[in-house]
Each structure stands twice: as structure tokens, then as C-alpha cells.
Amino acid sequence: MRDIVGAARMRALTGRSWWLLATGGIGVCVLAAAGYATTVTDLPPQEATDGLVRLWFTLLLFSALFAGNVTARDHATGTIARTVLTAGGRDRALAAGLRVSVEIGVVYGLVAAALGAATPWVLLPAAGVDVAWTDSTWAVVLGVFVVTAVAAPWGALLGWLVRSQVATIGILVVQMLLTDELVQRLAPGVGKFGLSMAMASIYGDGRVDLLAVPAAAAVIAVWLAVAAVGAVLLVRRRDVL
Amino acid sequence: MSSAPAVLFDGVCKSFGSRVAVQDVSFQVDPGRIVALLGPNGAGKTTSLRIALGLVTPTSGRATVLGHDFASLPDAGRRVGLAMDGIGAVRGATGRRELEIWARATGVSRRRVDDVLGLVELTDAARRRVAKYSTGMKQRLALATALLADPEVLVLDEPTNGLDPEGIRWLRGLLRGFADEGRTVLISTHILSELSQHIDDVVVLDTTLRFDGTLDEFTSSGAVSVEDRYFELVSTRRPEGSHHA
């Protein structure tokens, strides 16, 4: 299994998508943080500090896109057949892919947490605001790490379910940027159970109508479990064509 | 080496919705033989190969490789090599990177990557991206990938596509040497003229099994040409509305 996971890792790091998405995601976060830093002079230092760290949750979209793309492109190129063949079966190919998606998520999560933690120290002094690092800031750092890490297996599972590169990327973007937010606005009682809104609870978005952190963690676990069961069933039933 | 048939089809049927791709196909491929799987487009050749490799689940019947369902074949990735139309390289990979990935997956050393690159004469192009390769180079890379783990069974789908005459001659020698070591080659091909030069056995499919025997039996010991015999066995299909002048 170690060799199969190693090969899946090599496939993930082949081509340009890994560094394009990583640098693109970091670039978006840096721009957002720079923009936010121009508005912090009237904010309490703690709110400004937490807000700058929190912005790095944006990397979760790129984490999901990378893992989803890695999975779906194997189907697009037909490489999936050789992946299954060398893995010795579909279940093992899926297991190796998911293992690597967790690794991708952890790396993206660490990058988001580290750069998020560094951002207030760089931008706030320049804006004339003191950094106020508190326990709530640590909670935001942890939350940003967790949601960014979890986003990758979510993306990978969608890739296995949808098996189309364009559709996987489209679904992830629409779900994370549009539908979850829209449902939350139109029907908060339902919307708070959406994956993105549950993630917002974890990184301390601060909206009053979101779930408490333990409930949000349970909701995320349910979303992942449903996607995992669906992926396993489809991988076993569908032909690899 | 296993004493079981290298590949066995036992009453295999496969339908995609209402379309029957393969119906009640039974034959076996013995070790040390080069077997050609013949049939017109849509005859079920590629589907049959994919069933044997566990990529497509048969509607009924069973296919085994080296005595096992592919999913339960120990060390399957090393024991079976595959080059099949529609299986592309990892996007963005160079030739070397592609081979290194599958070498890693099957626990093969990087030195072997150099060996097979040399074998298929791609050493000089190893650092180029596969997307920039010609059709023939891609075919040779696919063959290199199939040969990487020095497998017992080689499954090749139209392996001569894109190869120049020299490449075809080289492939012929390679496959003969491979089979002479007691290993097995199952080739799906359209090129009938190739048959007499390196094939031991012939299987003809046209949804159902039309022929299964040695090349000598196929040609009635040379009394009938390969082409004439083939067209006796399979239905010829012409698109509706096409007419000859």
C-alpha cells in the first residue's frame, strides 16, 4: 500500500496544477489581507488581529480544487485504469487517493495557518494598530487549519463521485462560493447545515445564526461520511471505461 | 509461473443498458502463447480485455487472470502489464516521470525505468512532456509502461498503432522473446497481415465467440488466407446510407 500511496502522491505533484493553485490561493489571500488591513484602523486590535488570520480560510477552496482536480483528471485522461490495475483493485486505488488528499489538505492547512498567523504581525503595525493575540486568535488559527485540511478530502471525494474535471471544479466553486451562502441567507435554519457554513463555524466567522463548533464538526463529519459512502459504492459499481 | 490458464473467460456476458457488448464468451489463453483477439469495431474486444483486468464488471460469467479474479490476484500490478487505447499518461508528465510513477506503484526500481526507456528507444526523449510526443512515441511509452514490472501476462490493445515498420518489427521480436520465456501475450488487433508473422493462437469475437484455436487451424494449415477466413467469420458492417459507386 505504501508504494501505491507514493505513486498517488507523485501523480498529484506532476504537472502545473499543484503550484498554480497553491500560488493562486496564497495570492488571493494576500490581496484580501492587504485590502482588509486598510480598514482596520477603527477596529479593536483583537478584532483586527482575528480578522486578518481568519481571511486565510479562503485557501480551503484551493485545497478542495487541487484534490478534486487530481482525482478527476485521472478519469479525464484514462489514467484511472492503470491506477486501478497497479493498485490491485478499485478499493485500494480509492483508499490511496483519499490518503493523499488528506496529505494535501494538511499541507494546505499548515500553510494557511502559518501565513494566517504571520499576517497580523506584518500588516497591523504598518496600519498603526497593535497586534492583540488572544486565545480566540489561537482558536481561529486552529479553525483555519482544520477547515482547509478537511476541504481536500471533500474535493477528492467529489472527484470520485463526478469523474469529470470541469464538473468537479464547477461544483466546488458554485457550492463554496454561491449555493451554501445563498441557502444560508434565504433559509438560515437549513443553510447552517451546509458544509461551507459548518466550516464557517469552525473558523469563527462570528455570525449569530451558525451552529456551535461541536455541532458544526459533527455536520462536517456527516457530509464527508456521506460523500465517502457514495464514492465507495460508485467506485465498486461503475465500470472503469 | 502459475500453471493456471493465463487468462480465462467463462460464459462472459456484458451489456451496457440495452446494448449487448459481449455474449457468452468462453475461451482460455495458455501460458507461453501469443494470442490475437480479432474482431470488427464494436465487437467487444476492448470490453473483454477490460473485463479480464477487473475494470469492467461482467453482467454474468467470470474472467480470471493467472487463476484469480483480477481484484484478488496477488501482486496484480507487477504480474500483468497493460497498454490499452484510451489510457493516457498522467497530465503534465514527462516520459521519465510517467514511468517513475508506475515504477513506484509496482515497487520497481528506478534503474528499471532507464532499462525500459532504452528498450523502447525513448532515452533521448525522456525529459520531454508526453503531450509533445508523436503517436508512435506515445505507443512506445505505453509499451514501456506495460513492460516495466517484467510481467507474466502482457495485455496489448492495438499495439502497432502509430509504430513505423521498424517499430513493428522490433515489437514482433520482443513479443516472441517474451512468449518463449513462458509468458503470455494477449493482443487485440485489426492488422490481419501481422498475424502470420508472430501469432500462435487466434480468438475472433463479434459480440459472440466466432473462433478459438491455433493460427494453423484458423488458416486450415495455410489453405485459406487469414483475411478470407476472418471475413467468413465476422459480419461486415457498413454505415446505413453508404453506397459504393
Image (spheres, coloured by chain):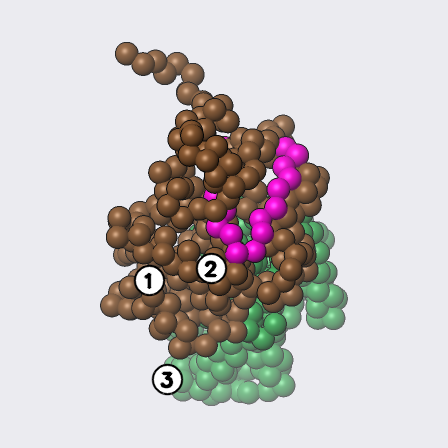
How packed mark 3 is, by other alpha carbons closer than 10 Å (few <14, some 14-19, many 20 or more), is few
Q: Colour of chain A?
A: green
Magenta stretch, overall SS: strand
In this rendering, do the residues under marks 2 and 1 share a single chain? yes
Q: Chain of mark 2?
A: B
Mark-to-mark CA distance, 3 and 1: 60 Å
* Circle 1 residue: B120
Chain designation of label 1: B
Which label is found at residue A126? Answer: 3
The magenta region covers B23-42
Q: Secondary structure at mark 1?
A: loop
Q: Are marks 3 and 1 on the same chain?
A: no
Q: Is residue B205 above or below residue B66?
A: above
Foreground label between 2 and 1: 2
Where residue B118 sits, quadrant-wise, is bottom left
Residue under pointer 2: B180
